[in-house]
Amino acid sequence: MCMRVPSSFQDHFASLSDPRSFRTPNLRHDLIDILVMAVCAVIWGAEGWEDLEDYGYAQAAWFSDVLDLPHGLPSHDTFRRVLSQLDPDELTKCFVSWTTALNDLAGGDIVAIDGKTLRQSFDRATSQSAIPMVSAWATANRLGLGQVKVDDKSNEITAIPKLLKILDLSGATVTLDAMGCQKEIAQVITEQGADYVLALKKNHSTLYGDVKLFLDDAQASGFADLD
């Protein structure tokens, strides 16, 4: 393992199991090298296995300086074989640990939770629908903190708490759109030591009416009695 890779990255991904360990005793590419190249490529905008390889060759001089790469650069087939066999739960925990540490270093404290659909994740041949995800984004640092897949026959309301529970949100303010305006979600956020700002729409008619009445009364009094 090349010690020129930042030790913090190695530390956070050290617990990630290498799926090749039991089948390939003489590995040509170290797992940490594959991960570093893949992360850099995705930040650059890579969306497929060939993109990972193309980015590696485009930045070959830099990667050769920071990684060992005794057998050269991994091919797109190597990226596919290794990354597609990683345990997704293990990878998520390592990635969230790493990005949370980066966010702490930069002092970011606004975390936006939002639902997205993965581009090009549908498969017409198998009739697989596009994959919906819920992601956490540190707005000040422009840093993705983590994401979870929305389970089949479910929705974002059930996926959001799963994401919140794997993040260190102490002292942060979490923002969500109207989909996340749920008592259970608000409770998870406060249990994680964070505050929240939730969008409120008329579909929550009782709560919407109470909040509107409160704000109307406050406005009429010039907000004199509010802290």
Image (spheres, rainbow, N blue to C red):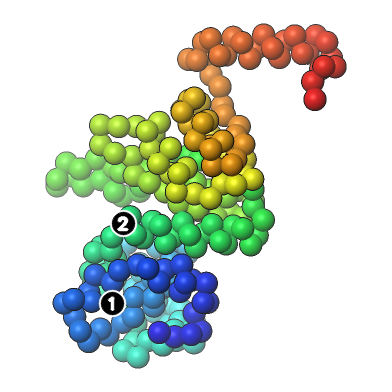
Location of residue 99 with respect to 74 vertically, above or below: above
Eye-nearest disc, 2 or 1: 2
- Amino acid type, mark 1: Ser
Earlier in the chain: of badge 2 and badge 1, it is: 1
- Amino acid type, mark 2: Pro
Image-quadrant location for residue 95: bottom left
**Residue at (78% x, 13% y) in the render:** 219
Could you say where residue 112 lies in the image, as x and y percent from the top left? 55, 42
Q: Is residue 220 left or right of residue 50?
A: right
Give the alpha-carbon distance from disc 2 to disc 1, as whole Å.
Answer: 22 Å
**Residue at (38% x, 38% y) in the render:** 159
Q: Nearer the viewer, residue 153 or 121?
A: 153
How packed mark 2 is, by other alpha carbons closer than 10 Å (few <14, some 14-19, many 20 or more), is few
Location of residue 45 with respect to 134 vertically, above or below: below
Residue annotated with mark 1: 75
Could you say where residue 98 lies in the image, as x and y percent from the top left? 49, 62
**Residue at (46% x, 67% y) in the render:** 12
Q: Secondary structure at mark 2?
A: helix
Is there any visible trace of residue 54 in the rendered image? no
Q: In the drawing, what numbered circle is on residue 88?
A: 2
Q: Is residue 138 left or right of residue 165?
A: right
Image-quadrant location for residue 67: bottom left
**Residue at (48% x, 15% y) in the render:** 203
Instruction: Tell whether label 1 touches label 2 (CB within 8 Å).
Output: no
Q: Is residue 221 left or right of residue 203?
A: right
**Quarter of the image where the N terminus is located:** bottom left
Could you say where residue 131 lies in the image, as x and y percent from the top left? 30, 43
